[in-house]
Structures are given as C-alpha cells and as structure tokens.
Image (tube, helix red, strand yellow):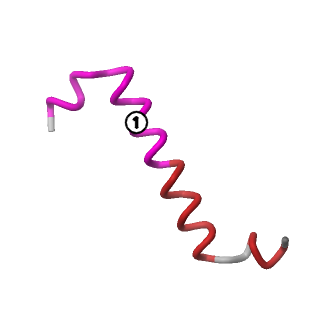
Amino acid sequence: MTRLLTSLKFWALALTLVWIAVVAVLIADHPELAQAH
C-alpha cells in the first residue's frame, strides 16, 4: 500500500481524475462557462 501511495504515476492519475471531475461539475453547474471558452 505504501508503494502505491508513493507512486508518482498513481498521484498523477488520481489528480487528473479529480481535476476532470471538478471541471465537469463546474461546467454542469455553470453552462455559460462552456460557451465562454
């Protein structure tokens, strides 16, 4: 488990998934953001 937690690949993947989820929620809550870009 410690090896997994210290894995840079694991953290990169986890952060990417969290970022995508946050962006998806923001766009869902604020449709105007999708058209602004």
Residue 6: x, y in percent? Answer: 73, 75
Residue occupying image coordinates x 54% and y 67%? 12
Disc 1 is placed on an element classified as helix
- Residue lying farthest to the right in this orientation: 1
Q: Which residue is mark 1?
A: 24
Does the magenta-highlighted stretch encompass residue 10?
no
Q: Is residue 33 left or right of residue 1?
A: left
Residue 18: x, y in percent? Answer: 53, 48
Instruction: Identify the amino acid type marked 1.
Output: Ala
Q: Residue 7: name its quadrant.
A: bottom right
Residue 26: x, y in percent? Answer: 39, 30
Specify start and end residues of the magenta stretch as a single range: 19-36
Q: Is residue 20 left or right of residue 1?
A: left
Residue occupying image coordinates x 54% and y 57%? 15
Above or below residue 26? Residue 15 is below
Above or below residue 19? Residue 36 is above
Quarter of the picture containing the C terminus is: top left
Above or below residue 29? Residue 26 is below
